[in-house]
Image: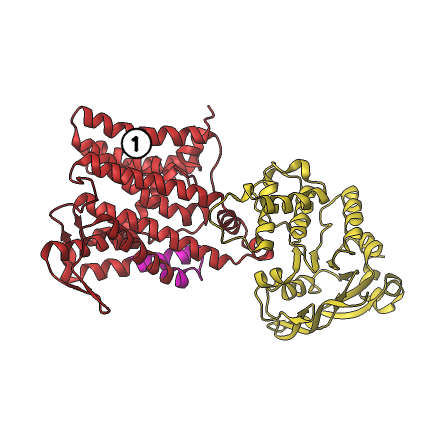
Chain colours: A yellow, B red
Amino acid sequence: MSDVVLETRGLVKRFGALTATDDVSIDLRTGEIHAVIGPNGAGKSTLIQQICGGLVPDVGQVFLQGRDVSGLSTAARAQAGLGRTFQISALCMEDGVLENAVLGAIGAQGASWRCWRGALRTEGLVARAEAALARVGLADQREVRCANLSHGQRRQLEVAVALTLEPKAFVMDEPMAGLGAEGSKEMTAFLDGLRSEAPILLVEHDMDAVFALADRISVLVYGKIIATGTADEIRASAAVRDAYLGEEA
Amino acid sequence: MRVDERMINTVVIAGLLALPLYALAVDEPFTITLVTRAVILALAAVGLNIVLGIGGMVSFGHAVFFGIGGYAMGILAYHAQTFTVLDLGLFTTGGTKMMPVIWLVAMVVSAVVALLIGVLSLRTSGVYFIMITLAFGQMFFYFAISWAQYGGEDGVSIYVRNSFPGLNTLVPIQFFGVCFVLLCVVLFLVAQLQASPFGLALNGTRQSEARAQAVGLNPMRLKLLAFVISGAVTGLAGALFADLNRFVSPSMFSWQLSGELIVLIIIGGVGRLIGPVIGASVFVTLEHFLGGLTDFWHVYLGVILLCIVLFGRGGIIGLLTGQEGAHV
């Protein structure tokens, strides 16, 4: 149960004089949810970007299932098995819910070079998309234009599109962002069940969700990991309390 | 009033076929030529609509492919009519007057040039993409002007329209038939393309590049393929246009033509299958009737364009169906 699926080794990213990521090495193991928390500006988004391929680190590597993916593009990393959700929903707003999920299926099956048969008439693509939609509870909304979805439904669709990829590891950037208490609870329950399928690297501000879900938590402050441990260890850590939790408590 | 888009498609295509037949019945060959002109411009804009409408790339240099199609026809037919040898380095040819061969050459050369232009210009986006495609357009325009072998600024005249097996293409209605059938075939193929996984992926890339990458799609390659297909279609239209006029000149490479193709699409409806056809029909109609009244008919075209951009961003189809079209 402790195989490392996703790993960063010594990532460093500087923007001028600012070191946004300072020697960050974290790993994500089979079956776990590993949460990364930290105050605003700690470098969480920069870290995610480097893992997913949007930013090239100055130093360090990213490994997915033991393979160095540091040189790969975002698209190639997604194909290699990295399923990502965005902090601010990045969906095709003009398209319907089903089309958005089918887009994921097209990516997953490498079908984007088929120029002939209708995508929505291709059994394999639609079945995969519908299965993912059903899991997040959007099966009834398949015909709805994405722009007409509620904020919470868009968050669900983000996750559904990632599910169509059947990834080896999820990287989720604040999946609870903007969800109400009820929605947040539902999403927490859903992610709880998802970890057995593929481990989740979770960046989240909702501390209730983090402490309910995370097997391990890493605390990022000024680009540096100051502590990694179980929820209890993090709660007990004086350094973490000083740097982060203390501000809110 | 809400009209089904499919009904609009049917009515437009039927109208485009009925008008020349009526003109034939009342013996008005000039009307047939006008409609043929609209059909060919529509075909060129259908090509542009693949990158502009589905892919969201505002190419301000599509006259390059229109001109290449025109010159492919002009050069091949020039050598055939003067019985001179065309030396292509690897091999020589005596040119040809056969339309299908000319079309094939026009499409292949356009596709290759589109590949080269695409590789260079698709690294940019937005205003820079517009500017770089415009720059390529101007390069071809000035090259054609200085290409003395093929008439330079004066272009090349072809005395007899090229031939199509079994038809007499000098009869306006028969040449119209050739162009009309080609337009219908291309529209059918583009409709398939738009609904296909490739079309969906390209459309998704336009709406959110981050989303496309996150599901493992490569936006650059998708756009490049779209650009190549688009160039080939516009190249085909260029060959027909030159055949319609039996003349090709550098004006086919002009940036005004690139702009007009964009205008046609905006008038009809960006990203709509039949949008470019409606746009071309409106354009040719205005050009004929208003152009007969005043030399400044572009002013009225401008007013219409302004109204469409301000009040109906889905173009004429958007106004009729009540749905806004794709936003660029």
Q: Crowdedness of circle 1 by 10 Å Cα count: few (<14), some, many (20+)? A: some
Q: Secondary structure at mark 1?
A: helix
* Res B298 seen here: no
Spot occupied by residue A50 in the image (x, y as percentages of width and height): 63, 66
Dividing the picture into quadrants, the one containing residue A138 is: top right
| Subunit of label 1 | B
* Res B314 seen here: yes
Residue at 54% of width from left, 54% of height from top?
B209
Viewer-side residue, B134 vs A15? B134
Instruction: In the rendered view, tell whether residue B264 sits above or below residue B229.
Output: above
Spot occupied by residue A223 in the image (x, y as percentages of width and height): 71, 69
Spot occupied by residue B231 in the image (x, y as percentages of width and height): 35, 53
Query: Left or right: where does residue B278 sit relative to residue B92?
Result: right
What main secondary structure does the magenta stretch of the protein show?
Answer: helix
Q: Is residue B10 magenta?
A: no
Instruction: In the rendered view, tell whether residue A69 sits above or below residue A45.
Output: below
Query: Left or right: where does residue B33 sit relative to residue A241?
Result: left
Spot occupied by residue B179 in the image (x, y as percentages of width and height): 27, 40
Three-letter code, disc 1: Leu
Query: Left or right: where does residue A245 sit relative to residue B73?
Result: right
Q: Is residue B134 magenta?
A: yes
Mark 1 lies on residue: B16
Q: Quadrant of the N terminus of chain A?
A: bottom right
Residue at 60% of width from left, 54% of height from top?
A108
Task: Give the magenta range.
Answer: B117-137
Dividing the picture into quadrants, the one containing residue B40 is: top left
Residue at 29% of width from left, 55% of height from top?
B64
